Amino acid sequence: PVFFAFRFDRVILDRDYESRSFRVVTPRVGVTPAPGLDIFLAYSRYWYGDNIRLRPNQIPGDLSVTQPDERVMKMQAQVRW
């Protein structure tokens, strides 16, 4: 069977400063080819406050990176028993 899912998260790092929070929306679609096995594709879209930045040298050797990713695609398989 095919399944669809949707997730919304709001992460508040400091409740006094909205600019230090971010939101993420993640829709996903998947299949369950066998009981206990799910394979899905997810797309996440992030919205960051103005004061969200990567730490210096967080990505080794890339000094030009100053903003986290805004769009992320993920393919995942998971098994439960």
Image (tube, rainbow, N blue to C red):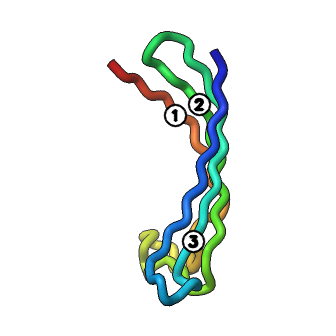
Q: Nearer the viewer, residue 62 or 28?
A: 28
Residue at 43 percent of width and 17 percent of height: 36
Who comes first in sequence, dot 1 or dot 3? 3
Q: Position of residue 34 (x, y in %)?
A: 50, 10
Write down the residue under mark 3.
22
Residue 8's disc is none
Mark 2 residue crowding within 10 angstroms, few (<14) / some (14–19) / many (20+)? some
Who comes first in sequence, dot 1 or dot 2? 2
Residue at 49 percent of width and 28 percent of height: 77
Using the numbered discs, state the Cα–Cα distance from disc 2 to disc 3 in whole angstroms: 24 Å
Mark 1 residue crowding within 10 angstroms, few (<14) / some (14–19) / many (20+)? few
Relative to 1, residue 77 above or below:
below
Q: Amino acid at mark 3?
A: Phe
Q: Amino acid at mark 2?
A: Phe
Mark 1 or mark 3: which is in front?
Answer: 3
Q: Position of residue 29 (x, y in %)?
A: 66, 32
Using the numbered discs, state the Cα–Cα distance from disc 1 to disc 3 in whole angstroms: 24 Å
Write down the residue under mark 1.
76
Q: Splitting the image into 4 quarters, where does residue 18 fall?
A: bottom right
Residue at 67 percent of width and 58 percent of height: 45
Say what secondary structure mark 3 lies in: strand
Quadrant the C terminus occupies: top left
Residue 40's disc is 2
Q: Position of residue 20 (x, y in %)?
A: 52, 82
